[in-house]
Image (spheres, rainbow, N blue to C red):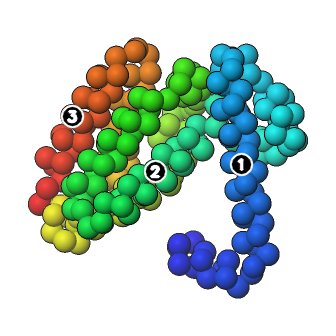
Amino acid sequence: MSITSASTDRQADPSASLRERKKRRTRDHLYDVALELFADRPYAEVTVDEICERAEVGRATFFRFYGSKAGLLLEFNRRLAEAVAERMEKGGTATATEDLWLVQDEVALTWGSSGPAMRELAREYIRNATATDLASETPYSELLDLVEAIIRRGQSTGEFATTHHPRFVSWVVLNALSAVTAGWLGGSDDDALIHGTHDAVQLLLNGLRA
């Protein structure tokens, strides 16, 4: 379903929009409660039961939204995409290249400022994910949509070559950034994250430019 058709459906059914907002609030609340607990104790010591108890939400609801404790990474990535979108909006009419650099900067900034619990959460997600999971769009679907829009705009203005489909290009961009970030999770050198994501985007831009 396209974004336009989804929007039309919501306008036609106000109750559906209300349900979605309630789901969103519940998802946000679970995530925020989890972060509060992670701030007090190591990631491994915080249980799903404890998150649900403090959030006053049933286990079934938690697993429906996140699948596992490590699934909270999905909300982390959604908020990362939201931060990128806000910066793009404030930045005005930037070029597609400048917006890709903005994505790189926000990825490095957000992960670089994340706490030990979030980094352990990401490591657990990677350890438990199947090859299909890691190759899918699910872990960062909102960010993928945003980067695809950047690539599509760059292709339409002649800034980027049109050799490859923008969805494929955006998937390659985010997988490159994810690979650098995953490598950085095993160490403590924040410069490696900054330089690694920068080099990944620079390499990809060399192939993207028309």
Residue 35 image offset from top left, x and y in percent: 66, 32
Q: Which residue is at a point 82% across and 46% down the rendered structure image?
A: 61
The kind of residue tagged 3 is Asp
- Secondary structure, mark 2, is helix
Which residue bears the numbered disc 3?
199
Q: Which residue is at a point 53% across and 25% down the rendered structure image?
A: 115
Q: Return the residue found at the far bottom.
A: 12
Quarter of the figure that contains the C terminus? bottom left
Can residue 67 be seen in this snapshot? no
Which residue bears the numbered disc 2?
83
Q: Is residue 194 left or right of residue 184?
A: left
Quarter of the figure that contains the N terminus? bottom right
Nearer to us in this view, 59 or 163: 59
Placement of 83 over or under 191, stated as above or below? below
Q: Is residue 4 left or right of residue 49?
A: left
The kind of residue tagged 1 is Arg
Q: Is residue 17 left or right of residue 158?
A: right
